[in-house]
Amino acid sequence: MPIWRPANTITVKALALIWQDDALLLSDIFDDTGRVKGMRPLGGTVEFGEPWRDTLQREFLEELGARITLLDSYFVVENLFEHHGVAGHEIIFACHAHFAESRFYQKDSIAFEDSDETSGIAKWASLAELDAKGLEFYPTGLREKLTEPGRPLTAKPRLS
């Protein structure tokens, strides 16, 4: 397993919030020993000159072979964090989305391959399940945005 450290720059990321009932599609976050320490929504780094919405479309097509429909509902989170003693700084666009094909909602897990050729498994998990397992929800600050008064916690999928 490759050891990851934050970049020494501000990174812009885009994450898709894809819901199935009260569960989000999430991938594992590991510590250096390979232990799962938390989970986060899928997405990726915005490339220079690429609008963040295009990043989400590209990432899901490349990594999962899936087309997604982005909703108008999005927000921005600034994530200042430390990972194994190294400071990180991310600006994150988080957008509610749906899979264009209903078959993705029928799977308990979805295999994907990152651009760095590492593979992963995306799973449906609720925030309550993460809490029960003692897992963090990343990025820091996203949970608070999702649970702000007046903000719906889930977005029901449109199945086609």
Image: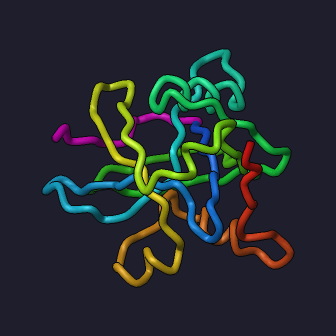
Residue 123 figure quarter: bottom left
What is the quadrant of the N terminus in the image? top left
Q: Is residue 65 in the magenta section?
A: no
> Is 11 on the left-hand or right-hand side of 145?
left
What is the quadrant of the C terminus in the image? top right
> Is 116 on the left-hand or right-hand side of 18?
left
Image x and y of residue 120, in percent: 32, 42
Image x and y of residue 124, in percent: 49, 60
Furthest residue to the bottom?
132
Q: Main secondary structure of the magenta part?
A: loop
Q: Residue at x 69, y 45 (%)?
A: 98
- Give the vertical position of 28 relative to 47 (above or below): below
Residue 129 figure quarter: bottom left
Q: Residue at x 81, y 70 (%)?
A: 151
Q: Is residue 4 in the magenta section?
A: yes
Q: How many marks?
A: 0
Image x and y of residue 27, in percent: 41, 52
Magenta residues (range): 1-12
Q: Residue at x 56, y 60 (%)?
A: 24
> Is 92 on the left-hand or right-hand side of 124?
right
- Give the vertical position of 138 relative to 147 (above or below): above
> Is 135 on the left-hand or right-hand side of 46?
left
Furthest residue to the top?
49
Q: How is the image coloured?
A: rainbow
Q: Residue at x 61, y 39 (%)?
A: 14
